[in-house]
Amino acid sequence: MTFTKKAFSIFEQSILDYHQKDNIDTPIYNPYGDGDIENILYKKNWIDTVQWHLEDEIRRPEIAPEEGMKFKRRIDASNQDRTDLVEDLDTWFYNKYHAVKILDNATFNTESPAWAFDRLSILALKIYHMNVEATDAEKSDEHRKTCQAKVDVLKTQKVDLIQAIEELLQQFEKGEKYMKVYKQMKMYNDPNLNPALQKK
């Protein structure tokens, strides 16, 4: 099994584990050891999965403004955690490939490996939830048919994205591509950089 396919299977495991209770307040139980890449991947998808459901909750038409703001704060914190984990994942890739001899004609990729895995994690969530809709016996035949068509497209995207990521990793291994780790330097969560947080 390739690294990318293994990562996708970890994302699927995280999604299934979350839906055992299907509760945004369920604490994470990461089955992988601290420092392992599998641990980072599992944690990354768990955050994405919880945030998926937070995004659902905040869109309830009857939600009270105070409750909606609480969800907004949680989503903001979740986005920061998500970004931090992407940076951890990119650091892992950087350390993995830093000793590779870079070819003279090596090129830089606009998207880092970790952000590609971020898209793969979200894709795993889309497939899971669209499949739920496609197989829901309480929904109309037309609804299920429409959702199944979307599942088919998402699965094609999965195959294509896994292949593209694997090709990118192989290029890193051969020195045909090189990477850098750029911190996102988000400003809105930093009281030293967000003027609105400095107002009394």
Image (cartoon, grey):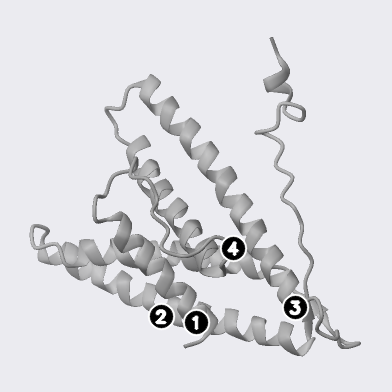
Amino acid at dot 2: Thr
Point out the tag, 3 or 1, that comes first from the N-terminus.
3
Q: In front of the other: label 3 or label 1?
A: 3
Label 2, label 1: how far apart the Cα atoms are: 6 Å
Disc on res. 160 = 1
The percent coordinates of residue 65 (x first, y second) are: 38, 21
**Of 43 and 12, which appears nearest the observer?**
43
Within 10 Å of the Cα at label 1, are there few (<14), some (14-19), or many (20+) other Cα atoms?
Answer: few
Point out the tag, 4 or 1, that comes first from the N-terminus.
4
Amino acid at dot 1: Asp
Q: Quadrant of residue 128?
A: bottom left
Disc on res. 156 = 2
Disc on res. 35 = 4
Label 3, label 4: how far apart the Cα atoms are: 17 Å
Identify the residue at horizontal 42%, vertical 32% (top origin).
Answer: 71
Q: Do tag 3 and tag 1 residues touch (Cβ < 8 Å)?
A: no
Within 10 Å of the Cα at label 4, are there few (<14), some (14-19), or many (20+) other Cα atoms?
Answer: few
Q: Is residue 173 above or below residue 87?
A: below
Label 4, label 1: how far apart the Cα atoms are: 29 Å
The percent coordinates of residue 155 (x first, y second) are: 37, 77
Label 2, label 3: how far apart the Cα atoms are: 29 Å
Q: Is residue 139 above or below residue 188?
A: below
Point out the tag, 2 or 3, that comes first from the N-terminus.
3
Q: Do tag 2 and tag 1 residues touch (Cβ < 8 Å)?
A: yes
Amino acid at dot 4: Gly
- Callout 1: SS: helix
Label 3, label 1: how far apart the Cα atoms are: 23 Å
Disc on res. 71 = none
